[in-house]
Amino acid sequence: MFKNQILSCNIRLYFVVKVFINVPWWYVAYNRLISPFLTQRTKSKFEFAGPTKTTETLFKYIAPEQVPVQYGGLSKEGEAEFTTADSATEDTIKPAGKHTVEIPVTEACTVVWEVRVVGWEVCYGAKFVPSVEGGYTWIVHKSRKIGPGDEQVVGGSFKIGETGKVVFTFDNQTSKKKKLLFRFKTKTSE
């Protein structure tokens, strides 16, 4: 009938919610019209989300690392580095503000990460700051603006031979708050 996906997820042991995503505006309006005639129990079994609320609705029921990339999550088919078992950290980037995430490095290793900002329109950059005074700061990922057309999972890796920290910066220049999804791993060098 229309292009939508039906996803179901178990909230409790015996309770299943059917989530309809990417439904057209007229169907959401129709559902709001008939909902007063339905019981609360019936209404609680279905969730409808238009294209602008898809990611937000899915995150209510499914962890971001299990939501496919095309719906705003971090799950990629055939992904070798991260799996759905690798949990992600969720954070909020305030409107017209900067947000930093720091990964402490206590030994020589390789740091691997994945970052996604739902709604993008942010400037993203990464650098390594050594703990040794007078050490050289490495630019890992040059700061650049990522627009809504480029909305994707940004990942990378950086081999580090000394102690310090990897600092990620997100500059939100819009008037809307953004949701940050972030996960990383450290692999010891052999």
Image (cartoon, rainbow, N blue to C red):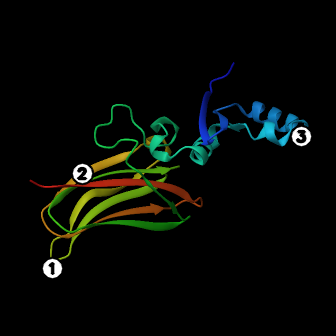
**Which residue is label 1 attached to?**
134
Tell me the distance, in whole angstroms, between the alpha carbons under discs 2 and 3: 52 Å
Indicate which disc residue 36 carries.
3
Q: Which of 47 and 117 is in front in this view?
A: 47
Q: Mark 1 or mark 3: which comes first in sequence?
A: 3
Which kind of residue does numbered mark 3 sit on?
Pro
Horizontal relation, residue 109 to residue 79: left or right: left
Please provide percent x and percent y for residue 168.
35, 62
Q: Which residue corresponds to the image point at 59% horizontal and 58% vertical from the top-left?
A: 176
Name which quarter of the figure residue 13 lies in: top right
Label 2 neighbourhood size at 10 Å, few (<14), some (14-19), many (20+)? Answer: some
**Which residue is label 2 attached to?**
157
The answer to whether the residues at label 2 and label 3 have Cβ atoms under 8 Å apart is no
Residue closest to the far front: 13
Name which quarter of the figure residue 135 lies in: bottom left
Instruction: Answer yes or no: is residue 138 visible.
Output: yes
Q: Mark 2 or mark 3: which comes first in sequence?
A: 3
Residue closest to the far bottom: 133
Q: Is 5 drawn above or below residue 57 in the view shown?
A: above
Q: What element carries label 1?
A: loop
Residue closest to the far right: 37
